[in-house]
Image (cartoon, rainbow, N blue to C red):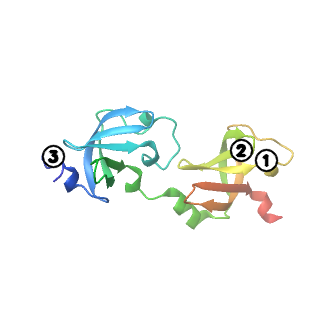
């Protein structure tokens, strides 16, 4: 049974992998509560989007209708966990497959003690270590040519080097 058919979802009718329609009931710092037609599910920030964001309301808004995937239903509690991002391909996997060790242009989005985070796609950032800076320290907003030399799709970590380093 689905909310779309006008009937209520029940935890017993929901199972992992099921795609259902829901309406955002509330948004809070750690996620959102989704009404699935009488059953409520939790959409945590970790399962909202592949792209970096700083606030849940950048991704979902109260009253918004959306399709979500059921990740699990607690056997005893009946708690329903949901995902929005799992309905979309992981852009980091595609990047790893298609662009590993390929020079690309990105923009510095954040400076940290270890180096600079560079965004080459809106979906993820990677670290350009300070040892790769050379004579010039980049600033936020600077354009840099980089290449990914390490990608871990499980931990979502990308390590960049300056593109010129590949030629050395």
Instruction: State the image coordinates of residue 9 (x, y, percent, origin top left).
Output: 19, 49
Instruction: Say whether marks 3 and 2 touch (CB < 8 Å).
Output: no
Q: Please identify, in this view, whether the residue under mark 3 or under mark 2 is nearer the observer.
A: 3
Q: Which residue is mark 1?
A: 130
Tell me the CA gap for discs 3 and 2. 49 Å
Tell me the CA gap for discs 2 and 1. 7 Å
The single residue placed furthest to the front in the displayed view is: 76
Instruction: State the image coordinates of residue 96 (x, y, percent, origin top left).
Output: 58, 63
Picture quarter containing residue 18?
A: bottom left
Tag of residue 97:
none
Q: Residue 104 versus residue 92: which sits nearer the camera?
A: 92
The single residue placed furthest to the right in the displayed view is: 135
Q: Residue at x 55, y 59 (%)?
A: 154
Picture quarter containing residue 41?
A: top left
Secondary structure state at the residue bearing disc 3: loop
Q: Which residue is mark 2?
A: 116
The count of marks equals 3
Q: Which residue is mark 3?
A: 8
Secondary structure state at the residue bearing disc 2: strand
Q: Earlier in the sequence, mark 2 or mark 1?
A: 2
């Amino acid at each position: 049974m689905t909310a779309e058919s006008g009937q209520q979802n029940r935890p017993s009718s929901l199972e992992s992998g099921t795609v259902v329609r829901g309406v955002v009931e509330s948004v809070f710092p750690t996620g959102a509560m989704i009404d699935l037609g009488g059953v409520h599910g939790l959409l945590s920030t970790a399962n909202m989007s592949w792209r970096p964001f700083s606030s849940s309301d950048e991704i979902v808004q109260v009253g918004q209708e959306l399709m979500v995937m059921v990740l699990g239903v607690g056997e005893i509690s009946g708690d329903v966990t949901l995902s929005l991002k799992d309905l979309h391909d992981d852009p980091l996997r595609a990047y790893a497959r298609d662009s590993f060790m390929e020079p690309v242009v990105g923009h510095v989005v954040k400076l940290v003690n270890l180096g600079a985070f560079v965004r080459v796609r809106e979906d993820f950032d990677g670290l350009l270590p300070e040892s790769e800076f050379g004579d010039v320290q980049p600033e936020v907003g600077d354009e840099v040519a980089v290449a990914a030399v390490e990608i871990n799709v499980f931990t979502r970590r990308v390590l960049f080097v300056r593109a010129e380093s590949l030629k050395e």
